[in-house]
Image: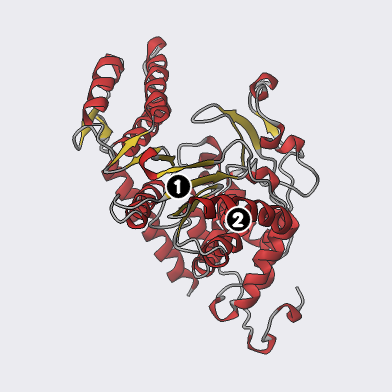
Amino acid sequence: MQLSLFDNPEKLQFYALRKEDLFSAYYDCRRNKRNAKNALKFEVNYESNLLVLYNEIVNKQYNPRPSICFIIKKPLQREVFAADFRDRVVHHLLFNYLSPIFEKVFINDSYSCRKGKGTHYGIKRIDHFIRSCSDNYRKNCYILKLDIKGYFMAIDRKLLFEKVKSQLSKATGDIKFDMNLVLYLLDKVIFNDPVKNCIINGQKADWDGLPASKTLFHAAAGIGLPIGNLTSQLFGNIYLNQFDHFVKHDLGIRYYGRYVDDFVLIHPDKSYLKSSIIAIREYLKEKLSLVLHPDKIYLQHFSKGVKFLGGVILPHRIYSANRTKGNFYTAILGQNEVVREQNPDREAKAGFLRSMNSYLGILKHYKTHKFRKQLLFKYLSGWWWNYAFLSGGIAKFNLKQIQNDYVFSRNILQNDLLLNNYKNKTQ
């Protein structure tokens, strides 16, 4: 990296990569992946594995390993690339370094992969925007919802790298890490082509019906990021950050929110929103080489409501989308199949908790108590009630044999103790 990249190179400080940063990234990475085979294999000798990874990074000999590629069907058909566990540790390391810097330049109303935000926050904000713009539903206002076609598969990696590097060059006072190594890792992660040498988990038929714009196997050279990586989520926000400021400041849209590639604009003038579509389409094409999805343009009076992030936002009320309810029913049937032939093992029980609690966590934010109760008591196999019980008013499943909240808290405490012990050893 050339020092000329920075406005004040004489003020730039240099930091060595700290081993405790890599250990912290490891603890973050394993928090929700401890039962995965890849994670368990790494954890057996995690200290030595992390030291090997550390040496590869500082000696600039790190190279990402092959990813596992597969198709998921719910909630939508998507192509996912699961990085090797050690590569996910590197992703968490980069995220921990970069996120605090970019949080300072992101608008408040980009909701994906940010602490204290997320889908429910986004839904509440759009509901608040509608009420504010319409003066509590007493004045006319209109909702424009747009979508970018094949967003992750269309991101220009070179342009993304330049955007990240440009912002880092402006934030030298906030940088407390080895810039050379971070730029080296960014180059390795951003320009890594996961299609090469990837391991296919599934059948070729799994890709049937998936549009070419939603698979990296049909992306042009140097284009596209893999869905499934933590860094891809952060990079997705960075890539559209200047676009967010364009909408809010250049177009003057006060009521605007975005979650990944879905964004909503609210304004009292319908004709102005119509004209904004043209300006947005041109900006995306000329500045970011992205295409506004021509079949996903929604412009309606606020009284018609809007579907956003799994919720249906209407005047005075918010409902869960029917697709979310249908997927919950399908997930229940899938869990019934697990116990139909055999008693569930530890991994199956953990999968049950993840699946059921993810849907319960979503649905509890809406008036769905009766729906949740009826669906679970009517359709969930009685075998699962032998292993699990509900708590919090049909809000969460717990295993009867293991109090998961206690185990989770104990694991976090162990992580902190291990990290503190390591710091003491290295001081």
Residue 39 visible? The answer is yes
Q: Which class describes the residues within 10 Å of circle 2: few (<14), some (14-19), or many (20+)?
A: many
Quick one: label 1, few (<14), some, or many (20+) residues within 10 Å? many
The N terminus sits in image quarter: bottom right
Residue 408 vertical placement versus 331 (above, below): below
Residue 227's spot in the image, x, y percent? 60, 42
Residue of label 1: 143
Between 28 and 226, which is closer to the camera in this rendering? Answer: 226
What residue is pinned by disc 2?
A: 235
Q: x, y (%) of residue 95?
A: 54, 59
x and y percent of residue 224 in the render?
70, 46
CA–CA distance between discs 1 and 2?
27 Å
Tell which tag, 1 or 2, sits nearer the viewer: 1
Q: Give residue 205's quadrant in the image.
A: top right
Mark number displayed over residue 84: none
Q: Nearer the viewer, residue 50 or 316?
A: 316
Label 1 sits on what residue type? Ile
> From where the camera sits, is residue 62 visible?
no
Label 1 with label 2: CB-CB less than 8 Å: no
- Decide which of 405, 361 is in the foreground and name it: 361
Query: Which residue is drawn at the image coordinates 24% and 21% (left, top)?
Result: 374
Total label count?
2
Q: Please identify the residue farthest to the right as the structure is shown.
A: 221
Identify the secondary structure beneath mark 1: strand
Image quadrant where residue 50 sits: bottom right
Which residue is outermost to the top?
Answer: 341
Q: Earlier in the sequence, mark 1 or mark 2?
A: 1
What's the residue type where badge 2 is placed? Phe
Which residue is pictured at 69% across the width and 71% down the height? 180
Q: Residue 169 appears in which quarter of the rendering?
A: bottom right
Q: Secondary structure at mark 2?
A: helix
324 vs 146: above or below: above
